[in-house]
Amino acid sequence: MNRTLPRFARAERLVHRTVAGLTGICIVTAAILYLGPLALLVGHRRVVVLVHVTAGLALPVPLLLGLGSRAFRADLGRLNRFTPSDWRWLRSKTRRDGTIRVGKFNAGQKLNGALSAGSVLVLFGTGLLMYFPSLARLAWRTGATFVHDWFALAFGLLVLGHIAFALKDVEARRGMRTGSVSAEWAREEHAAWADELSP
């Protein structure tokens, strides 16, 4: 029987699912608000705006609640730390052949985490300025709208890229779904992390 290794705690999986759901709602409602044919098809613009704003305001909540989990905090520390092997991994054309020993997260996953967190902060702040116009003068609100729109597009593309990579890796998806991955996959994709868990 193939041995498995624990990859994500229940709290981490719950945070990921909740953030994914809220992000999906934000992306779909943003598309409805900005694409004329979709807006005409759906209608109820005020309701769509309310759903979009509510999901956007709620987006940081699961991340903050996740801080109550020791495993979540530990993984945030891992995501926030670039090692020399991460820089080698980014520069390598054969980064997935296992010659560069990778920890629990590879450099691409770390970059995705940093860009996602930064995008959520920018979208949250600019969204507040747009939805509550009394918070700032007109020039700031105009700038906030411009930044919000372009960050939303970039973040949407980042999310699509994340989904595309996830669809290619059944075992990584299993880790996020069940919390465990096969030891063989861990040794191939994240050898340094697999060694940490070895008795």
Image (cartoon, grey):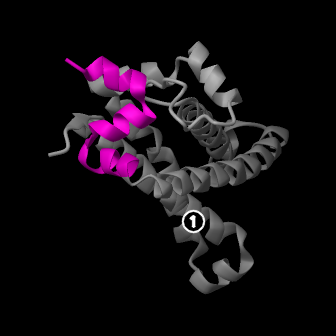
Q: Position of residue 158 (x, y in %)?
A: 63, 49
Write the start and end of the magenta stretch as one range: 171-199
Q: Is residue 111 left or right of residue 70?
A: right
Please name the residue shown 42% across and 36% down the image: 188
User: Is 96 in front, or is 120?
Assistant: 96
Q: Which residue is mark 1?
A: 29
Quarter of the view holding residue 153: bottom right
Q: Residue furthest right?
A: 139
Q: Position of residue 69 (x, y in %)?
A: 27, 26
User: Is 195 in front, or is 78?
Assistant: 195
Q: Quadrant of the C terminus?
A: top left
Please name the residue shown 24% across and 34% down the image: 5
Please name the residue shown 28% across and 36% down the image: 183
Examine the rendered structure and indicate whether residue 193 appears above or below residue 60: above
Decide whether residue 173 is among the magenta residues. yes
Quarter of the view holding residue 156: bottom right
Kind of residue at badge 1: Thr
Q: Is residue 78 left or right of residue 93?
A: left
Decide whether residue 56 is among the magenta residues. no
Q: Is residue 31 left or right of residue 96?
A: right
Number of callouts in the render? 1
User: Is 110 in front, or is 14?
Assistant: 110
Q: Residue furthest top?
A: 84
User: Is 62 in front, or is 125?
Assistant: 62
Q: Secondary structure at mark 1?
A: helix
Q: Is residue 12 visible?
A: no
Q: Position of residue 191 (x, y in %)?
A: 40, 27
Q: Position of residue 14 (x, y in %)?
A: 30, 44
Please name the residue shown 26% across and 42% down the image: 179
Q: Is residue 103 left or right of residue 71?
A: right
